[in-house]
Amino acid sequence: MTPTLQAFVVVSAALFSIGLVAALSRRHAIFILIGIELMLAAANLNFIAFWRFAPQPHQPTGVMFAIFSIAISAAEAAVGLAMVIAVYRHYHTTNVDQLDQLKG
Amino acid sequence: MSSAAFVIIAIFTLAAALAAATLRKLMHAALSFAVALVGLAALFFLLGAEFVGLALVFIYIGAVAVLIVFTILLTRRDVGKDRGFNWAGVLIALAVFCGLTWSILKTQSLSIVAPHIRALTVKRIGEALMTGYVWPLQCVGLLLTAALIGALILVMEEKR
Amino acid sequence: MSAWILDHLWLIPAVPFAASLIILSLPNAWRRSAAALAVTGQVAALGLSVIAFLPTVQTHGFRTAQNFTWFTFGDNGLRLGFVLDPLAAAMLLMISLVGLCIFVFSIGYMADDKNFVRFFAYLLFFSGAMLGVVIANSLLLLFISWELVGLASYLLIGFWIERPSAAAAAKKAFVTTRIGDMGFFLGMLWLYNRSGTLLFYDGGKGCLESAGLAMLGASATFIALLIFFGAVGKSGQFPLHVWLPDAMEGPTPVSALIHAATMVAAGVFLVARVYPLFSLGAINGVTSSLTVVVWIGVTTALMAALIAIAQADIKRILAYSTVSQLGLMMVSLGVGGVAAGIMHLLAHGFFKALLFLGSGSVIHGCHSEQDIRKMGGLRRFMPVTFLTYAIGMMALSGVPFFFSGGWTKEEILHATAHWPKSPVPYYLMLAGVVLTALYMTRQIIYVFFGNPRAAAKHAHESPRVMTTPLIALALGAILLSVVLTPAWPWLHEYLTGEAVHFEIGRLIQPALFVSLVLVGAGIGVGLWMYRKAGVQDGNRPAQIDPLEYAQPALFRFLENKMWIDELYARTVIAFSWMAARLSDWLDRYFWDGLVRGFGGIGQAFAMFTSGVDERGINAGVDETTVGARGLGRLLSAAHSGQIQIYLGVVAIGMLALLLLYAWLA
């Protein structure tokens, strides 16, 4: 017996939701970044899974998507972490509760 | 592709991810994040995307996780303090998970088994990257350069 | 060579764009390389324009379009393209040539500016965008370039951003033209909806060709009017002319570029380009959309000419004169004299750039003084500037025979006189001609004659790099008249494609005498009225304008631009104030229940997301429920600044969409 596409997608959904928990519930900016990275990873899992289970997986489209997505999330992580450091330097905190300069 | 391997890897990945999201200490969470990504890479291997799995290990564990650890160290003074945990977020995430799972289980076309394929060699990926995907590749290169410069400018010391 | 350029029309705007990007990345200190690169880029554009011009001269009614597919969705594709016809080629040549003169002039004028490099990058960007407008073969591509022109004008008008007035003027120009662009955009959507294509020429299938026009029917009038609204904004026509005089806050070369070669020319060009839309179903050359164009043009021309008489700022006078001349061109297009309008646009490009650069030279010589009442007697200090300025003034006033403006103005008058609908525009145009001569005479007397006053005491001639472009443009203003005469109307023939031959007898026409008399009258009245401008005369103190002394109320009215800015402030601001009061009232007595409901939801959400939100949403909800000023505060209160709440709302929204989709499926 082999796992179906459904199983992979459910795992991906779970991973996404865990990422959401980290992004929504934790107060430290780095946790939010970790959460976003987890969500992106879940998306990558979907790309790969759908590619593998597609009727004609000979075209490497899904793999290409995943590769580009990984590259983009790496860029996102670099900029995000740089912003955490800049914010920390400026406000002396990384607690997102205290960062409400955009308050209307 | 065996179910046993899948179940073990999936549980391992999700447990590590859960630890990354909920552990109290930031450093532990960051390390759990790296472990979760190892699990994810294993899932990619299971799916026959060895190249992506390796790329994931190199980029995420080799670079992003290390970057996170560095950031934690750089913002150290702020780490020790007690932080609240917002249960509303968990509720929302749970609702999202239930909604997703429900719609996944409802979709019949997803319960299919993987077809047999030739292994996707690195050669083919390279060929695809250099032919059909050369423009996206260049764009990603540009994006990464821009992100690099942007990150540098962001963390540069402000001039007095 | 000519075959090559037809396949590479895109190079004409692309070269300046590329050069602009390179300059933008240069360090601030590389002034010489920036200037050299800018001039090189513009020279390259000029060279390409000349190459593109050649094939259009060789064949009558030459037109070639080069289309390509931008992207496809389903079976439909969005196609863009470039077109080369006499209209485009003549404009290309004018823009790149006048632009080049302005670039060279700027090297001298901006020599001390600390953002020299950036300035040239913007200038080149401006020029590239305008070239894009001219050779676009698709309304969409034209619109894209059109908006780039708008962006460039915003950047350049607000170039001295540290001055609040410059920042405000840039904003005003951007917002005002954007109002017009909204009409343009709606017209474009409507056109696409009806004809299914935005290409002008596409082997018989374009929206300006018979098959495309046939699909429009009665909606053509409305589409044309909506597009004209865009032209009204860009070309500073009444009622959207208010931004143009304020655009004088930019550096003078920018004013020259905006007022002569680019930006404002875009509106007139647009109307000329989509002229088939306007003239569709014309009876005797009159359609309702063209009638609107005529009346708007007449109003603008006369109003701006009147206002120009009472202005004291050397550049503002020229600005209103531009508005007035653009009105003249619009009238010409409206009465069916497309060739005359475009010829005047081309001629105007030269002499108005000349006048603006001349005024820049004057300002430079007078150490940044712009008030003409403080100048005087400059002809002795700045002979080259004076001579070239006088040539520009005579071309603008429409002195016949030797100056380009005279012939084109005469041709416009000729076309207007034969408009079957009403003779009124013709007589108003005649009045406009007199006024033009009058205000230009006034300006030149104030600036160059009489005794030197405060600012003119230490005036000096500008450096060679600034006077050379002036001489070049003055030569252009004179030489252009050779191809404009009715005896050998080469340019007319070139634009319309009709074959005309040389005939000396046509040189003398009734309209010529009319314009001769009118211009003479304008200049004569000006000389008589302002003979003692700037000096004491009887009871009149030296600093009081003769007209102001004779007619204080009228002068005040004109000096304050007919109170139009104030009128807008009163009406627009009053309207939004009333609307605000109305919503306040509705909010208190009608929406309050709803707001309470919202408040309840908000409160629930606030409790839901625990104590964090208490300060944010709850405080906002409390205030609204006790009778807040408007719904706006509630909405702003939802912006707690907490990214996690935003993210949570996004997640809930995603879930809702998912459930909706699953439910519908």
Image (cartoon, coloured by chain):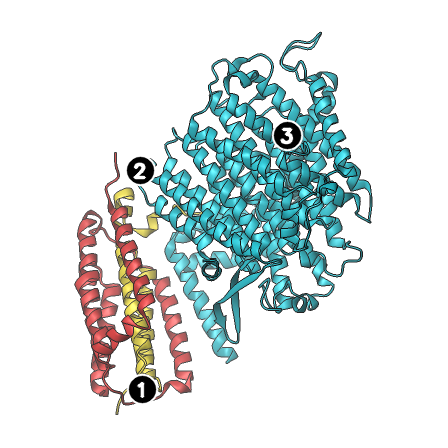
Chain colours: A yellow, B red, C cyan
Q: Amino acid at mark 3?
A: Met
Find disc 1 in the rendering and name its residue. Answer: A4
Nearer to us: label 2 or label 3: 3
User: Helix, strand, or loop for circle 3?
Assistant: helix
Which residue is painted at 49% across and 26% down in the image?
C361
Question: Label 3 lies in what chain?
Answer: C
**Circles 3 and 1: CB distance less than 8 Å?**
no
Q: Which mark is residue C316?
A: none
Nearer to us: label 1 or label 2: 2
Viewer-closest of C654 and C270? C270
Q: Position of residue C155 (x, y in %)?
A: 46, 41
Q: Quadrant of residue C573?
A: top right
Q: Describe residue C443's horizontal placement relative to residue B18 as left or right.
A: right
Q: CA distance from mark 1 to mark 2?
A: 63 Å
Q: Which mark is residue C394?
A: 3
Q: Describe residue B96's horizontal placement relative to residue B138 as left or right.
A: right
Q: Describe residue A26's horizontal placement relative to residue C62 as left or right.
A: left
Question: Taking B49 as reference, is C622 above or below it?
Answer: above
Q: Position of residue C267 (x, y in %)?
A: 61, 48
Q: Quadrant of residue C108?
A: top left
Nearer to us: label 3 or label 1: 3
Which residue is painted at 65% across and 29% down in the image?
C308
User: Helix, strand, or loop for circle 2?
Assistant: loop
Q: Amino acid at mark 2?
A: Trp
Question: Taking C337 as reference, is C299 above or below it?
Answer: above
Q: Amino acid at mark 1?
A: Thr
Viewer-closest of C431 and B96? C431
Find disc 2 in the rendering and name its residue. Answer: C30
Q: Residues within 10 Å of mark 2 (few under 14, many from 20)?
A: few
- Residue C528 visible in rendering: yes
Quadrant for the N terminus of chain C, please: bottom left
Question: Label 1 lies in what chain?
Answer: A
